[in-house]
Structures are given as C-alpha cells and as structure tokens.
Image (spheres, helix red, strand yellow):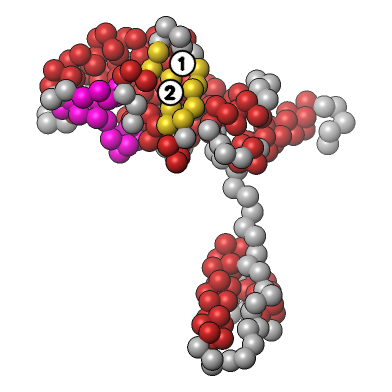
Amino acid sequence: MIGDFLMRLREGDADHPPLTASSAGRTVVAVRGFHKFCLREGLTVVDPAAAVKPPTPPQRLPKALSVDEVTRILAAAAGVEGNVSAPGSETASAGPAVLATRDAALLEFLYGTGARISEAVGLDVDEVDLEAGAVLLRGKGSKERVVPVGSYARDALSAYQVRGRPELVRRGRGTPALFLNARGGRLSRQSAWTVLRRAAARAGIAKEISPHTLRHSFATHLLDGGADVRVVQELLGHASVTTTQVYTLVTVDKLREVYATSHPRAL
C-alpha cells in the first residue's frame, strides 16, 4: 500500500504533478515516521511502511569552472581597478592595493591547494612554509594534512605578506591569522565569499560561485591532467576515496563530450 503511494507520488496524476525523487523521498520519510510512532504508541500492531525505502535522488555532480574561467577570476582579484568601493567599506578603509594583494593570495591559495574555505581562513602564518612550498591544513575532525603550494600561490602569498598583511596587522591588535580583514582581525568565511564573488563579477562570470567551487575545480582539473584519484583524495582530505570518485564522473562527462564532437563515427 505504501509502495503504491510512493509510485503515485513519482508518477503523478491529473490533479498532482509528479514529484522529484528528493521530494517524494521526504514525503515517504514523513510517512515512515508516522507509522513508527503509531507502532511505538501501541496504536497499531504492524508497520506497513517498514519495508518501503525512499527513492534515491540522482547524484549531483560538483560544478567546476573551466581553467579559463578560474584564470580570469584570479586575474580580476589581483587587479586594483574595480576594487574601489564606497566610503566606509572594507576596501575604502584599508586601501585597494592592500586588499588586492590579499584577495589574490586568498583565491590563488584556494585554487592552488583545494583547501576548504574554513581551512583557509583558519590558517596561521606559521602553518605556511613558502620555502618548502607546503601548508598544514586542519580539516574535518581536526584531521591534519600537508598539501603542496604551487608557484602561483606562493608568489601571491609572498606579495601579500610583504606588501599587504603588514598594513592590515597595523590596524589590528595582533593576530597570528594569515588572512586578515581591513580591521586587522581574522578574515571571516562570509568576507572570503565576498572576495570571490566580487572577483567573479569583475571577470564577467555570472555563474553561481562559492569558495567550494574553486575546490571542485582544483580536483577536476587535477584529474583532467591525469592525477591518480588516490592522490587527489589525500590532497582534498577525504576520509574515503568514494567521495573523491564523484569528480571522476565529471571528467567522464567531459570525455564523452569530446568523443561525441571529435570521433567520425560517434553519432
């Protein structure tokens, strides 16, 4: 009976449009919860929904930017032009050149290491070794991992630490944080989102973008370049390789697209 109800939800009828897997799943969970309650309270002697499983929603693939889009965003973050804002804003209070070095360093770091935004804004200065080209990241559950830092990110971080961070430190009360806001305090996740979205807007990219988009792009571009999925797993700090393998589906889609447009007998 409950199975028939689920089928009706998915197929719809003349009065009700069909529900997506996720919507139908939420409805079935509510129905299962109701029948469990009835059984527990002695209102019924059997749970007719016990064997009914909610439909599995389709796997959502991570959305990655192209290499060209990432390059445009990074270039826009480094440009002083367009950083000028209204009086009282972060840019106006700290100066566009100072914040341009910080913004470029932050976004180069996110894309160059695949770090989560929480890992980036939680970094302290002594956790980045520019000479060795490595950074100590603390991920979920305080699990630590050492990730290499590429030359572009190293150069951007070096410029920020020489020309940007000292001015921001002077405005604050002293903090070991690597990325600082205009008042000299640790940069927040929300401010980091603003940095990325502002750079994307200046780069003319209208897609929905978050700092995690750079992490997705980092993983996808590594796999596109031939990196082993186990290596990407370690770089991302995933506990299971299954989580990382989602990115291989993205690259397979790209291969199919290239194949379909390039092979003479593909279509």
Q: Nearer the viewer, residue 120 or 1?
A: 120
**Residue on which disc 1 sits:** 134
Q: Residue at x 65, y 41 (%)?
A: 242
Amino acid carrying label 1: it is Ala
Q: Is residue 22 above or below residue 204?
A: below
Q: Secondary structure at mark 2?
A: strand
Q: Secondary structure at mark 1?
A: strand
- State the predominant SS element of the stretch in magenta: loop
Q: Is residue 209 visible?
A: no
Q: Measured from the top left, where is residue 49 in percent x and y?
A: 64, 79
Q: Measured from the top left, where is residue 255 in percent x and y?
A: 73, 30
Residue 262 within the segment the image draws in magenta:
no
Q: Which residues are magenta?
A: 175-194
Q: Nearer the viewer, residue 199 or 227?
A: 227
Q: Residue at x 12, y 31 (%)?
A: 88
Locate residue 76: give its quadrant: top left
**Residue on which disc 2 sits:** 136
Query: Which quarter of the image is occupied by the C terminus?
Result: top right
Q: Measured from the top left, where is residue 19 in percent x and y?
A: 59, 68
Query: Which quarter of the image is occupied by the N terminus?
Result: bottom right
Amino acid carrying label 2: it is Leu
